[in-house]
Amino acid sequence: MMRLGIALLLLLGFANALAQEPLALVSDAVEGQSYSLSIQILVLMTLLTLLPAAILSMSAFVRIIIVLSILRQALGTAQTPPNQVLLGVSLFLTFFIMAPVISDINQNAAQPYIDGDINAAQAFEQGIQPLRAFMINQTRDSDLSLFAGIAGSADAASANDVPLSILIPSFMVSELKTAFQIGFLVFIPFLVIDLVVSSVLMSMGMMMLSPMLISLPFKIMLFVLVDGWALVLGTLASSFYT
């Protein structure tokens, strides 16, 4: 868990550090230790492998990608938009939602660590606080109580006292619940269209004609008329408490 937090901090500040000055062959750490350039690159490549897990487990990505996947299923458009497009939209919307958190981490943890003012442990402690606050705001108390009970942990006095080992799974379960609730509301209008088209076809005796073939243009037309993409993405962005 410590390495996960440090990975986020280093990745956020690495591009800015490269823009300001090149990496030296030997760099002095806060404690006076030295690390060669090859060691720095090896550590960075190792930390990069943790980035997908961090995005999935500690950000808004889970809720967004699930809702967009349910929306595509409700439209009945199979692989349109393709998975790459959904992933791209989800990633950039996640970056938009998490921008205040990322800015806070960069200002209070990543930059001081790059400048050598604090060590890795201090950078982790300062950088995890904005993420902790974000996850706490999205997590239901019932989910926190559930995992605290499973872990045999007593109730925390405050949000800052909740261990990450309890907070992260609680956050992910809450995100799954919220995503499916939003997906259910998104699915209802398209389900109504399918039911209406099926009833009309049955009343006309056209039972051999697939209802999906007839309802698809109407669902797309409805989605376009109500500016569906802006409505769904705007609702997703506003559903987070940052």
Image (spheres, rainbow, N blue to C red):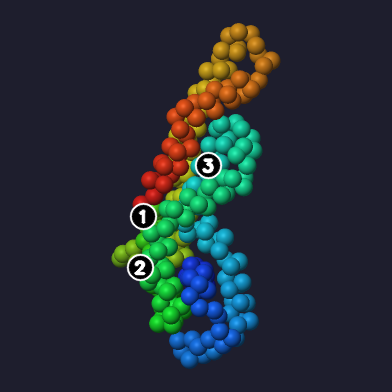
C-alpha separation, residue under disc 3 versus residue under disc 2: 34 Å
Q: Name the residue furthest top.
A: 204
Q: Is residue 89 above or below residue 41?
A: above
The residue labelled by disc 3 is: 68
Q: Name the residue furthest bottom.
A: 32
Residue 4 visible here: no
Comparing 197 with 116, the one in front is 116
Which quadrant of the rendered structure holds the C terminus? bottom left
C-alpha separation, residue under disc 3 versus residue under disc 1: 21 Å
The tag earlier along the polypeptide, 1 or 2, is 2
Please give the name of the residue rendered at 61% of the width and 77% of the height, measured from the top-left corner. 41
Comparing 200 with 32, the one in front is 32
Instruction: Give the x, y percent position of residue 215.
Output: 58, 22
Determine whether the residue tagged by mark 3 lies in a helix, strand or loop.
Answer: helix
Instruction: Give the x, y percent position of residue 201.
Output: 60, 13
- Label 3 close to label 2 by CB (< 8 Å): no
C-alpha separation, residue under disc 1 versus residue under disc 2: 20 Å
Q: Is residue 35 above or below residue 16?
A: below
Please give the name of the residue rendered at 50% of the width and 78% of the height, measured from the top-left corner. 21
- Label 1 close to label 2 by CB (< 8 Å): no
The residue labelled by disc 2 is: 161
